[in-house]
Amino acid sequence: MSSAGDRQHSSRKSSAPDSARSQLSEDMQTETNGGKEGSVMKEETLELSISNHGNGLTNTPEVISIKEEEADDKDFLYCEVCQSFFFKKCEVHGPALFIPDTAVPMGVADRARQTLPPGLEIQKSSIPDAGLGVFNKGETVPVGAHFGPYQGELVDREEAMNSGYSWVIYMGRQCEEYIDAKREMHANWMRYVNCACNDGEQNLMAYQYRGEILYRCCRPINPGQELLVWYEDYYARDLGPTFDQLWNKKCSANGKVHT
């Protein structure tokens, strides 16, 4: 199984550059995606007058610096061609391409399969003992295309750790949420995408964006190829052992061991 040390062979270390942050500051600070606001950094200085005549204190101005939540990598998208982060749109290639799910109400039997985007099919995986997988049966999926978000139910940590269909959402220090796609009627097709066994196999990168998990195409997915996912380093880095346990469970659930 993989460990924290195993990540370095296939995950890319990257962080939001100054250019992306500059773009963020130039755009409206309330720019939203699906009703969710991105985090921006804003620092204000307040001057307060403190007065306590009873204790012999005089009015003394005190300057207090208040810093709001800083923008981090999870507020940005990534351009595979430019190999740089961007907010809202890439300055060279424009807005990100999102391939939507087929709309199916929650709670419908076999919902996960029914949400497959046109051109994708579920069949036996090309990976031995991995069960089912997702294959491209349509046109080539281009680099930079996005799938998602990953859908499922919010569960507690214990349930997530015992499932092979969970991802963890980083909400802040010592604050995490777990989304589990074990129940098909409350999940989408992304639950069937298998983990890649090595760097050479992966064609999707999982990462967190504004509180959700997306899969980004990092290599062209040609007709007949299976969709195989790995994860972005900057997504996993804040999660530590929690992510390692979930990732190992996802791999072992399909009978795979990463080396």
Image (cartoon, rainbow, N blue to C red):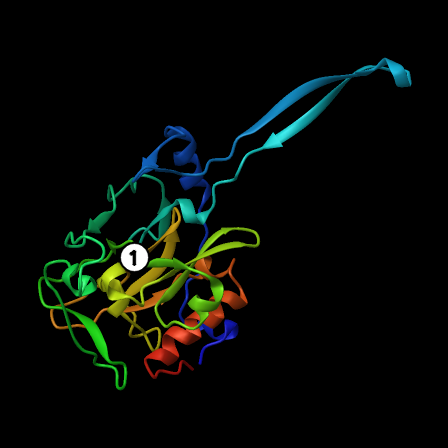
For label 1, the SS is loop
Could you say where residue 249 lies in the image, as x and y percent from the top left? 41, 75
Looking at the image, which is closer to me, 101 or 197? 101
Q: Which residue is mark 1?
A: 151
Q: Position of residue 196 (x, y in %)?
A: 32, 74
Q: Is residue 2 visible?
A: yes
On-image quarter of the C terminus: bottom left
Specify the amino acid type for callout 1. Gln
For residue 203, side relative to residue 14 (left or right): left
Image coordinates of residue 193 in percent, x first then y, are 26, 69
Question: In the picture provided, is 35 more to the left or to the right than 53?
Answer: left
Instruction: Locate the N terminus and report the quarter of the image it occupies.
Output: bottom left
Task: Residue 258 in the image: state x and y as whole percent.
Answer: 40, 80
Q: Residues within 10 Å of mark 1 (few under 14, many from 20)?
A: many
Residue at screen point 29% across, 59% down: 215
In front: 15, or 205?
205
- Answer with the quarter of the image where residue 159 lies: bottom left
36 or 235, which is in the foreground?
A: 36
> Is there any visible trace of residue 219 in the rendered image?
no
Return the residue nearer the eye: 191 or 71: 191
Q: Residue at x 70, y 18 (%)?
A: 48
Residue found at the far bottom of this picture: 128
Q: Residue at x 45, y 45 (%)?
A: 17
